[in-house]
Amino acid sequence: MKTFGGPALFLDRADINTDEIIPAKYLTEITKEDLKPYILEDLKLPGFDPKGEKTKDSRVIVSRSNFGCGSSREHAPWVFEVNDINAVIAESFARIFRQNMFNCGMAALELPKEKLDLLFGYAGFADTAIAVDIEDQKIMVKGGGKEESISFEISPFDKALVLAGGWVDYADSKY
């Protein structure tokens, strides 16, 4: 089974759209791997460098509400997948982006604002890492000598998709 977690990238803004996740000019690339260097290229946040080590090393993204809004392209989850980011945690997601994440076997986890604010309390620590236990529905965050465990909800079907590795693997095992 896939491991969910690792160093965290905190993107403290709502409404991060699919054009900021992977700019439309790269949608003509032939393979998922070709998308890799363009992750978050057009995202503008103070102090954020899409080509920086923090972005390259991160395995989990923590953001605010309406993450993945914009067009319904699968390329947005794909660019996370090829960059080994397999979990995004936010207050809410655009519906199609969220389902594309699950269909690709990745976790799109929603937390209420209070729990999300608790996670953002770890944003300033250089050693912050987040582990996601899909089976037990727990997020463990460590950083700055502190640690927390946060429960999350996920539908049984979405959980099954993630645990199977995505829609294709799920369908292969069921049909």
Image (spheres, rainbow, N blue to C red):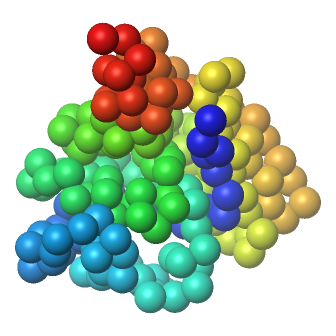
Where residue 122 appears, x then y in whole percent? 69, 59
Which residue is farthest right? 145
Q: Position of residue 98 (x, y in %)?
A: 30, 38
The answer to which quarter of the image holds residue 135 is top right
* Front in this rendered view, residue 98 or 167: 167
What residue is rendered at 35% in x and 22% in y? Answer: 172
Count of number-bearing discs? 0
Residue 39 visible from this viewpoint: no
Horizontal side of 65 relative to 83 (left or right) equals left
Rendering coords of residue 148 (x, y %): 78, 41
- Quadrant placement of the N terminus: top right
- Tell me if 110 is positioned left or right of 26 in this view: right
Along the line of sight, the residue nearer the viewer: 156 or 13: 156
Q: Position of residue 56 (x, y in %)?
A: 53, 78
Query: With respect to residue 153, does 47 lie above or below?
Result: below
Q: Nearer the viewer, residue 126 or 27?
A: 27
| Residue sitting at x 45%, y 12% | 156
Q: Is residue 153 left or right of residue 120?
A: left
Q: Is residue 109 visible?
A: yes
Residue drawn at the location 54% of the way across and 44% of the way down: 116
Q: Seen in the image, is 96 located left or right of residue 71?
A: right
Decide: is 66 above or below 133: below
The residue depicted at 30 percent of the width and 11 percent of the height is 175
